[in-house]
Image (cartoon, rainbow, N blue to C red):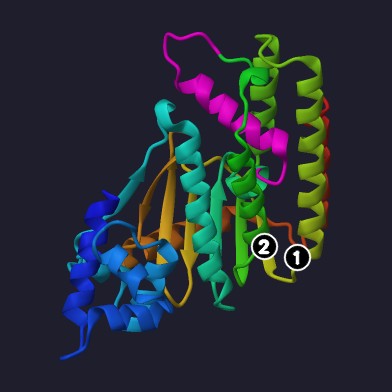
Amino acid sequence: MKEELNKELITAIAQCLPRGESMVNLISEILSMGKESVYRRLRGEVLFTFEEVAKLARGLNISMDNMIGLKSIRRALFDLSLIKMDNLFDKYYEVLDGYIEIFKVLKRDPGSKIKLAFNTFPYMFVTPYPTLARFQLFRWINQIRVNQNLTAFSALEMPERVLDIQRAFVSEMYGAGSTQYLMDESMFSSFVQQVRYFAKLRLLNKEETRQLQQELLALLNDLEALSIRGSFENGKEVQIYLSDFAFKLSSAYFECQDFVMCDLLLYSMNRVRSYNVKLCQTQSDWIESLKRYATLITQSGEIQRADYMEKQRECIMTI
């Protein structure tokens, strides 16, 4: 799939070339890249990264959809990312690395936006907490292993390169000009139920369960401080909403001057992605519509915020 998109991208660039202009020279100038590196991309030996595609789209003044061959407004290309057991850590690494590229592009635009509506912890919530991030992978592995023995939490060893990409993800994830979180109120209680379930199966020992409890409390404390402050530590704006009702799918919307993009979370850790402008706008509008049935707890809604935080602490302490 990625190789095909790379070919579509090269074709789109060729169609946008000014008369007499060298493709290699043009790409080299836009990306501030050596000619040999450009040749490797044109030969397909190295694929263009997301950040490079975004720069080219901006430099050539064409949309991301047009760059990958979608000129009809009635068609949308979806990137389906499925994590398989045979390449679990490779794919997980690729997912986080892809988001890092996106965050780097967003960081360059002060007007960039992220909107998240989720009924389970997103990567941006759990990745700063090593045990919670590891539990997400552990839960997913045991969920998809049909007719196989369950894996104990202690048996899941995280490669060092995966830990490195998680740290890189955390260092880059707060770069957007503004961020909106719209949370399902059952998010914490659902996670607690999962921890208790695996503890009863003896796949989590007492110390591992205690570590998860402590990191959940740390996450909740950080979330409360964030909602009171209304900004990340780097000063970037954040708004947090509590939904009054549950919603089925978690989704994300990203916007900056270089591109728009939306993700739909499928099957726990898998996702469907599109850069189609109309589809992304529909996704953004849907997230905005959910706010009609939600309470803003950022720098407001003090009573609702305090009540919610207290209930989540009580729930976490039942582990």
Name which residue lies at 34% across and 75% down.
Answer: 35
Q: Is residue 289 above or below residue 310?
A: below
Amino acid type, mark 1: Gly
Visible in this render: residue 269? no
Badge 2: how crowded within 10 Å, few (<14), some, or many (20+)? Answer: many
Coordinates of residue 40 in the picture (x, y in percent): 30, 63
Q: Is residue 50 above or below residue 80?
A: below
Coordinates of residue 149 in the picture (x, y in percent): 51, 8
Visible in this render: residue 81? yes
Amino acid type, mark 2: Gln
Q: Residue placed farthest to the bottom in the image?
A: 19
Name which residue lies at 58% across and 42% down.
Answer: 245
Observer-nearest residue: 146 or 248? 146
Is 103 situated left or right of 84 in this image? right
Coordinates of residue 194 in the picture (x, y in percent): 64, 23
Q: For the residues marked 1 and 2, what is the alpha-carbon distance in whole angstroms?
A: 6 Å
Rendered image: mark on residue 239: 2
Answer whether residue 141 is magenta in the image: yes
**Part of the protein shown in magenta:** 127-150
From the image, which quarter does the C terminus lie in?
Answer: top right
- What residue is pinned by disc 1? 230
Badge 1: how crowded within 10 Å, few (<14), some, or many (20+)? Answer: some
Do callouts 1 and 2 mark residues in contact (Cβ within 8 Å)? yes
Q: Quadrant of residue 109?
A: bottom right
The dominant secondary structure in magenta is helix
Q: Secondary structure at mark 1?
A: loop
Coordinates of residue 170 in the picture (x, y in percent): 66, 53
Which of the marked residues, 1 or 2, is nearer the chain's N terminus?
A: 1
Name which residue lies at 76% across and 50% down.
Answer: 223
Observer-nearest residue: 130 or 215? 130
